[in-house]
């Protein structure tokens, strides 16, 4: 009887380990391409595109929902296929990319809008040439995100994600990525806060549509309608 119980326990443990392995293998494998920029943002300089890619990679890895391909494996294949310019996996080469990098999907991000405004609010204090307070800083950033299926070359998911800061700060949930390189000086600036906000939003969106599913997509559809309606209000149409 004791031997039967031990065997049963081992069998259950084995099933648990097998289930865990299956869950691990079921995670989407993603590569994060170098971010592109279509704005005149002053903080954008050489190397920032890959820095943003690395920060998003850290965020996605930290969720435990994805297997993220290392940049070293991805970059060479991207250069070979000229994906940096085309923004699309060429027909017939997706399988090759998947074999070489292990990526099922390629995540591409483009900064399409950036605005920053610093205005005086009055009430500031100046002492021996040093000014404290009296200013309000705001920043806005928009990133177009596309998830390309490495096998088919088709865009499976796409969305425009926005990040905003206002006044003293912004609530962005838990941001796990660090600022370094060319972005190190932006850590506590309105730009840095907006970047953190947008990367967290991108992470939450990808977790929803690629992993969680089951209803959360409706929330993002509602956000997208709200974003579009907000943009329409700023336009004068005949």
Image (cartoon, rainbow, N blue to C red):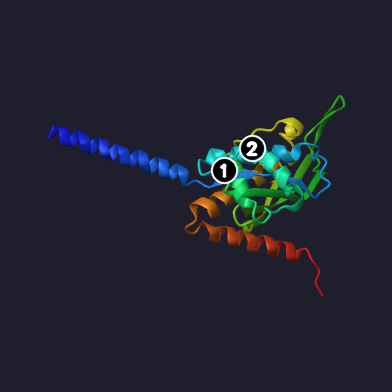
Query: Is residue 110 shown left or right of residue 62?
Result: right
Image coords of residue 61 (percent x, y)? 56, 39
Tell me what residue is drawn at x 58 percent, y 51 percent.
205
Tally of marks: 2
Q: Which residue is mark 2?
A: 73
**CB under 8 Å between discs 1 and 2:** yes
Above or below — where is 82 with respect to 230? above
Left or right placement of residue 3 versus residue 107 in this view: left
- Distance CA(mark 1)–CA(mark 2): 9 Å
Residue 131 location in percent, x, y?
A: 82, 31
Q: Position of residue 156 (x, y in %)?
A: 60, 58
Residue drawn at the location 30% of the way across and 37% of the way down: 13
Most foreground residue, 117 or 123: 117
The residue drawn where x is 64% and y is 56% is: 153
Q: Residues within 10 Å of mark 2 (few under 14, many from 20)?
A: some
Q: Which residue is mark 1?
A: 102
């Amino acid at each position: 009887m004791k031997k039967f119980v031990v065997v049963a326990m081992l069998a259950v443990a084995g099933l648990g380990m097998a289930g865990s392995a299956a869950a691990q293998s079921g995670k989407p494998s993603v590569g994060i391409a170098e971010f592109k920029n279509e704005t005149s943002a002053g903080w954008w300089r050489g190397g920032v595109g890959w820095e943003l890619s690395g920060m998003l990679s850290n965020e996605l890895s930290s969720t435990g929902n994805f297997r993220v391909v290392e940049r070293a494996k991805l970059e060479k294949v991207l250069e070979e296929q000229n994906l940096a310019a085309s923004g699309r996996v060429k027909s017939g080469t997706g399988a090759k990319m998947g074999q070489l990098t292990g990526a099922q999907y390629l995540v591409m991000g483009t900064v399409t809008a950036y605005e920053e405004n610093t205005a005086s609010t009055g009430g500031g204090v100046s002492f021996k040439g040093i000014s404290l307070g009296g200013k309000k800083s705001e920043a806005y950033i928009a990133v177009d995100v596309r998830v390309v299926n490495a096998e088919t070359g088709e865009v499976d998911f796409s969305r425009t994600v926005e990040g905003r800061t206002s006044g003293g700060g912004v609530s962005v949930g838990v941001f796990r990525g660090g600022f370094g390189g060319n972005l190190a000086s932006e850590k506590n600036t309105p730009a840095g806060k907006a970047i953190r906000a947008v990367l967290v939003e991108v992470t939450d969106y990808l977790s929803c549509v690629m992993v969680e599913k089951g209803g959360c997509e409706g929330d993002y559809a509602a956000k997208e309608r709200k974003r579009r309606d907000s943009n329409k209000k700023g336009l004068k149409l005949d």
